[in-house]
Amino acid sequence: MLAFLDMDGVLTDFVGAACRAHGKSNPYDDAAAQGVWAMETLWGMSGKEFWAPCNGEGFWDRLEKTPEADDIVKLITDTFGVENVALLTAPSMSGFCIPEKRLWIRRNYPQLEGGMIFTAAKKFLAGPDRLLIDDRDKNIEDFRLFGGKAVTVPRPWNRMHALSDKPLEVLYRVLGGLQEFLDESEG
Ligand SMILES: [Mg+2]
């Protein structure tokens, strides 16, 4: 099986960085915001207003790791083999985004540097024996619709938000079950 691992909201704390860029507090601290994907909606601004401070030089390079990032990378590479794991991440419209994401990966997870795919259209990579690990409901739905398997990383902005205090535990359980299922179908 080939595994596609998302970056923003999974390995990188995009929400934290966007809050700092806007000088605003985390909108997901409000219980009513749970499960709402678009931060700009929660902040009552347009997409253009939202992205303006996030697209300057250094924004993508300075993203911090999520607390679980190292463990998620280890879990996914141990489970599928590093040669079967690619990072699959949507670039913003900023010209700084892709080069800075490349540098971020080289600095933090050089073992994955050879497998980096930049597209927002993740469904085009879906298919049998392909697994997406992502934090966006729409990406998960589309990937499944086109024949792939998909695992949601529980976060306050997706439908798994009730479990967002323990994303790693959820991934361990889901991937453990998936591995058993695959072993059984092969045996
Ligand atoms: Mg994401």
Image (cartoon, grey):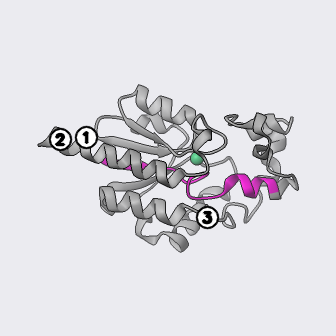
Q: Amino acid at mark 1?
A: Phe
Q: Which mark is residue 131?
A: none
For the magenta stretch, what is the residue range?
1-19
Q: Give coordinates of residue 172: x percent, y percent.
A: 41, 52
> Would you call the spot at circle 2 few (<14 residues within 10 Å), some (14-19), or many (20 or more)?
few
Real-space CA distance between mark 3 and mark 2, rounded to the nearest whole angstrom: 35 Å
What element does badge 1 sit on? helix
What element does badge 3 sit on? loop
Q: Which mark is residue 181?
A: 1
Disc 3 to disc 1: CB gap under 8 Å: no
Task: Of the two numbered discs 3 and 1 on the same chain, state the one appearing first in sequence.
Answer: 3
Q: Give coordinates of residue 187: x percent, y percent.
A: 11, 43
Residue pictured at 58% horizontal, 67% vertical: 104
Q: Mark 3 = which residue?
A: 65
Q: Is residue 55 magenta?
A: no
Task: For residue 117, say whether it is visible.
Answer: no
